[in-house]
Image (tube, rainbow, N blue to C red):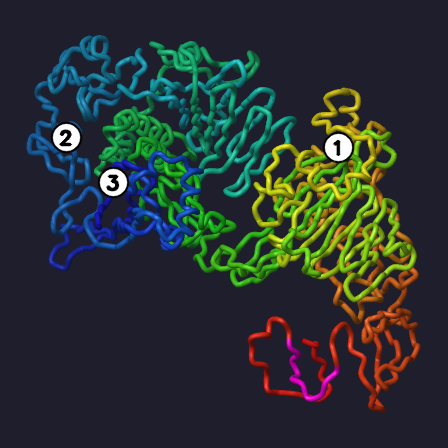
């Protein structure tokens, strides 16, 4: 379906910009005459294209410039923005999505008559209403009258006017519309000005006597909630009362008990220099603004642009830039106050919500005298030198200036603005335009044409607020310049289509409000102040921008930036269970809970019964819950970690002790076997690695257990079911879902008979029981909600760690800083895993509490790789993990040796991997391996040529064979045909 339009149109639904008219007026003189001018313009006609397609195609249509038509699509108009966004997501992955209506406007340039002209040759001017008494329309809305007639439509009969009987005009200049009651008859001065409230009494182009306006005019049947001050003297109250008041002091625009908005007129004896200074208070927040010069408090500057705003918790105040205006929104009780001002002399104050009659009367009082009314709100100090309001201003006294003003201001009454004449009183704004034009024309250095442009702009803005958009600017009438790729519109969305919102549905508010502004041309998207094509849109990840085509790592997946969105591989990633502080658990599937209870060994990970016979899965990780060290016995922590895998039993104790199969390895790590690798990853963490698992223990109260996807649906325990489903993590050994944390935990006791008879109950809010302790906890834990972690707020829930720090501190009761250090380190690790590195230990709130001293030659980092700078892993990286481990590691170009010292690479030992023993070999030592002499050089064994034929010793369960394929067989290759290329001396698994 196509529906086309040109010029103005009523906006029934502001989801769509109903028209945009670009007029390039040209005057063409035909060759056959010099007296007739063709008024042709190049008009941009917009046609609306609609499509009915499956809602699952939402993204595709949005990228093509369409928008979802919520009114035409059944069931969508009543949905909230949040509910609709969820539905759109569900539809995107559902083949059974319903049909949706999509619409967009497409442009087409056509040559036609300029506004105000008709006819095949575009030579006939249009006057609305038409000229009468044989008058001739010579220009749009300008009539040439025959002898004996005058007036703006030749309706005034000169012969009917006498000394005592004249025409009664609506405005104080004896031109334009008549006062409605008198119509086209001549009346006395008293009937015109005193009885009917006319504007002037006389004859157009003749003697004219302005009436003394004693009544403030009011628009009929318009319920305003917006107060407006414009130019040098125009005011409109919340009730819609319009009046002219020429006071140049400081006035109350609106106020309540909790807030006020005052305005000071600066330099308003001239329209060109007239500026408005706002003085606003919301609760205790004080804001001063003049144009873009905004400050709060004691003169603290606020910088606002299209992308950066200001917000304050005091008064619920936010300030943003919306097109040509700065917009302040504040909340006070049930009221919402909006203040909008431009860089020149226009101010709007809007109040929404429950405001009582007393408030409306206070700021919208119906007055019979504009001067008295205006001066009544003057709050200027007595010694201030400012001009008080006097009689209603009227400056059009010079006939030539008045005629110029009439021609300039006729644009308001032209065909272009006709669709709005029934919405906003054009005569009143015509009167304002005339008055301000005459004042500017008689003021040295002022700009009368600028007055016209500003008046037209404000009138068009009011029209847009009433759902009638007038795109009135042309290349010759008040043109606006925009950056490349942009066009100026009177009704630009407050939520422009940007690269950041490329795939998001605009909220309902975005389709209801609009502002005059430069906006991107159709098909382009705003990014960093420029309009770019979809293919130029970058992607964001953790506040960092990546260009189109960039590939980065997210978890275990590779993600490519494609037209503003990430396309990622779908590899299943490992998951981590963590226990931090006083038994705060986060399961593999991200369930959060805390425990108290018994002092026993609990199984965090154990195989499901059906997998216990599989040695790869038969991993048991247990934790001893016992009293936290140094806390007086008021809370429980992990005291010992026990790991059983492949008949190897490992104990990791508080304080860093490591025991493997009843033998202490604390001082002689690493421990390496065919199945398990135990090492000091950093000065803080011990790492245990085996098939599909990786465990980190800090020797205090922090434990991380990471399992590969191989273990999905194969294990259970206090770390949950590991089935990618959070809600069933409290499933017991018997398959029963428990609702109480402790009941669930008791089902995974390792050995109930070994439990200590004591138990400690879990206190949900320990800080509430001791106000003094709570105050101390607030002081200690405030680091977690400070700006130290601000960069990470977008990726980590600092509130969770802050609450755990508070609880642990109050439960310990011993003024220890350990809860802060523990939870800050856990938060920093979460940030580091997302690529955001926080050097929090140097923050003033932590430096005296959680600082770490590294031995000489090493440095502290929140995100060390567990294989960086280790002699053992120079050659063999089979037990390395690409993760973040905090602690001290050797400086660059030095490596950790077996004695825990940082040495240069040339002093590193080597490790034999051929026989599986990983025996250390001293630097520069030579050994014989497989009939070859091998020398340890820079941490690697450099072997010469083999000189004998002996049986080769193969590691693990491999055997030596001749003439095997170069690519050895794996489980993945079980059903594949191997390559035909072979070489001698290949190793192959004994399968």
- Residue where numbered disc 2 is placed: 153
Whether residue 844 is visible, yes or no, is no
Residue 822, given in percent of the width and then of the height, sits at 78, 40
Q: Which residues are magenta?
A: 960-969
656 relative to 597 in the view: left or right: right
> Is residue 96 or residue 42 the one in the foreground?
96
- Residue where numbered disc 3 is placed: 8
Mark 2 vs mark 1: in front: 1
- Residue where numbered disc 1 is placed: 597
Q: Are marks 1 and 3 in contact (CB under 8 Å)?
A: no
Q: Is residue 130 above or below residue 662?
A: above
Q: Which residue is most to the left?
A: 134
> Is residue 818 or residue 208 the one in the foreground?
818
Q: Are marks 3 and 2 in contact (CB under 8 Å)?
A: no
Q: Is residue 90 above or below residue 919?
A: above
Mark 1 vs mark 3: in front: 1
Q: Which mark is residue 785?
A: none
Residue 937, given in percent of the width and then of the height, sits at 87, 76
Considering the numbered disc 3 on the image, is that residue within a helix, a strand or a loop?
loop
Which corner quadrant of the image does residue 128 belong to? top left
Q: Is 173 contained in the magenta span?
A: no
Name the residue at 90% across, 72% down.
921
Question: Whole-Å distance between the Cαs marked 2 and 1?
Answer: 94 Å
What type of secondary structure mainly makes up the magenta span?
loop
**N-terminal-most mark, 1 or 3:** 3
């Amino acid at each position: 379906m196509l529906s086309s339009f040109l010029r103005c149109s009523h906006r029934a639904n502001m989801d769509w910009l109903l028209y945009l008219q670009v007029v390039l007026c040209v005057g063409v003189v035909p060759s056959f005459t010099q007296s007739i001018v063709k008024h042709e313009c190049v008009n941009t006609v917009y046609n609306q294209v609609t499509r009915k397609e499956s809602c699952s195609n939402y993204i595709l249509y949005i990228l093509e410039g369409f928008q979802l038509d919520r009114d035409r699509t059944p069931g969508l108009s009543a949905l909230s923005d949040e509910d609709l966004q969820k539905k759109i997501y569900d539809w995107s992955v559902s083949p059974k999505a319903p049909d949706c209506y999509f619409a967009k406007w497409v442009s087409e340039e056509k040559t036609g008559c300029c506004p105000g002209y008709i006819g095949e040759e575009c030579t006939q001017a249009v006057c609305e209403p038409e000229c009468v008494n044989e008058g001739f329309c010579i220009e749009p809305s300008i009539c040439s009258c025959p002898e004996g007639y005058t007036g703006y439509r030749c309706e005034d009969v000169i012969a009917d006017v006498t000394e005592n009987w004249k025409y009664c005009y609506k405005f104080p200049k004896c031109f334009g519309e008549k006062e409605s009651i008198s119509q086209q008859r001549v009346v006395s001065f008293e009937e015109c000005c005193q009885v009917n409230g006319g504007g002037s009494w006389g004859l157009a182009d003749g003697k004219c006597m302005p009436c003394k306006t004693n009544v403030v005019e009011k628009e009929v049947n318009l319920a305003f909630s917006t107060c407006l001050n414009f130019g040098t003297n125009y005011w409109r109250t919340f009730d819609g009362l319009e009046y002219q008041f020429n006071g140049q002091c400081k006035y109350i625009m609106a106020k309540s008990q909790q807030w006020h908005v005052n305005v000071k007129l600066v330099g308003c004896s001239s329209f060109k220099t007239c500026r408005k200074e706002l003085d606003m208070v919301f609760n205790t927040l004080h804001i001063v603004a003049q144009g873009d010069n905004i400050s709060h408090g004691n003169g603290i500057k606020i910088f606002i642009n299209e992308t950066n705003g200001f917000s304050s918790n005091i008064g619920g105040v936010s300030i943003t830039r919306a097109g040509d205006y700065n917009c302040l929104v504040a909340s006070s009780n049930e009221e919402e106050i909006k203040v909008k001002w431009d860089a020149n002399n226009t101010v709007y104050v809007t109040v929404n919500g429950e405001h009582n009659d007393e408030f409306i009367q206070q700021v919208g009082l119906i007055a019979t005298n504009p001067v008295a009314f205006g001066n009544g709100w003057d709050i200027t100090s007595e010694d201030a030198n400012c001009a008080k309001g006097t009689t209603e201003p009227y400056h059009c006294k010079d006939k030539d200036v008045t005629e110029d003003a009439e021609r300039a201001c006729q644009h308001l009454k032209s065909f272009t603005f006709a669709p709005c004449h029934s919405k906003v009183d054009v005569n009143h704004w015509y009167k304002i335009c005339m008055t301000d034009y005459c004042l500017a024309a008689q003021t040295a250095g002022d700009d009368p044409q600028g007055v016209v442009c500003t008046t037209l702009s404000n009138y068009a803005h009011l029209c847009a607020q009433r759902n009638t958009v007038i795109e009135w600017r042309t290349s010759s009438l008040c043109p606006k310049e925009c950056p490349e790729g942009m066009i100026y519109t009177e009704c630009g969305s407050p939520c422009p289509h940007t690269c950041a919102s490329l795939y998001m549905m605009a909220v309902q508010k975005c389709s209801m409000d609009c502002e005059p502004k430069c906006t991107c041309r159709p098909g382009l998207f705003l990014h960093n102040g420029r309009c770019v094509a979809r293919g130029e849109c970058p992607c964001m990840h953790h506040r960092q921008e990546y260009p189109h085509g960039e590939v980065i790592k997210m978890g275990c997946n590779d993600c490519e930036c494609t037209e503003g969105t990430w396309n990622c591989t779908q590899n299943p990633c490992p998951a981590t269970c963590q226990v931090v502080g006083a038994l705060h658990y986060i399961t593999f599937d991200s369930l959060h809970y805390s425990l108290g209870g018994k002092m026993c060994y609990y199984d965090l990970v154990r195989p499901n019964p059906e997998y216990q016979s599989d040695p790869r899965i038969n991993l048991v990780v247990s934790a001893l819950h016992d009293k936290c060290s140094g806390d007086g016995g008021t809370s429980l922590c992990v005291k010992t970690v026990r790991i059983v895998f492949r008949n190897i039993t490992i104990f990791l104790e508080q304080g860093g002790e490591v025991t493997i199969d009843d033998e202490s390895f604390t001082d002689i790590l690493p421990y390496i076997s065919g199945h398990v690798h135990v090492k000091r990853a950093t000065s803080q963490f011990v790492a245990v690695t085996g098939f599909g698992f990786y465990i980190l223990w800090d020797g205090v109260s922090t434990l991380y257990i990471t399992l590969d996807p191989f273990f999905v649906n194969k294990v259970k325990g206090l770390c949950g079911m590991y089935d990618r489903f959070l809600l069933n993590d409290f499933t017991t050994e018997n398959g029963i879902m428990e609702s109480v944390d402790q009941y669930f935990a008791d089902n995974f006791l390792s050995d109930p008979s070994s439990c200590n008879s004591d138990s400690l109950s879990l206190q949900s809010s320990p800080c509430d029981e001791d106000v003094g302790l709570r105050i101390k906890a607030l002081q200690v834990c405030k680091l977690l909600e400070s700006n130290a972690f601000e960069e990470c707020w977008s990726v980590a829930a600092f509130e969770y760690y802050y609450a755990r720090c508070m609880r642990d501190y109050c439960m310990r009761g011993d003024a220890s800083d350990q809860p802060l250090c523990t939870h800050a380190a856990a938060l920093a690790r979460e940030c580091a895993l997302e690529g955001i590195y926080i050097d929090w230990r140097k923050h003033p709130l932590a430096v005296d509490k959680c600082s770490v001293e590294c031995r000489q030659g090493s440095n502290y980092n929140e995100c060390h790789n567990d294989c960086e700078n280790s002699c053992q892993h120079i050659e063999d990286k089979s037990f390395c993990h690409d993760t973040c481990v905090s602690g001290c590691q050797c400086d660059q170009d030095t490596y950790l040796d077996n004695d825990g010292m940082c040495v240069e690479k040339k002093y590193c030992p080597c490790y034999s991997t051929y026989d599986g023993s990983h025996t250390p070999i001293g630097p520069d030592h030579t050994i014989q391996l497989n009939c070859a002499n091998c020398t340890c050089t820079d941490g690697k064994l450099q072997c010469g040529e083999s000189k004998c034929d002996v049986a080769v010793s193969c590691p693990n369960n491999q055997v030596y064979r001749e003439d095997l394929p170069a690519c050895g067989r794996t489980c993945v290759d079980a059903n594949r045909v191997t390559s035909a290329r072979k070489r001698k001396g290949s190793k192959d698994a004994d399968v």
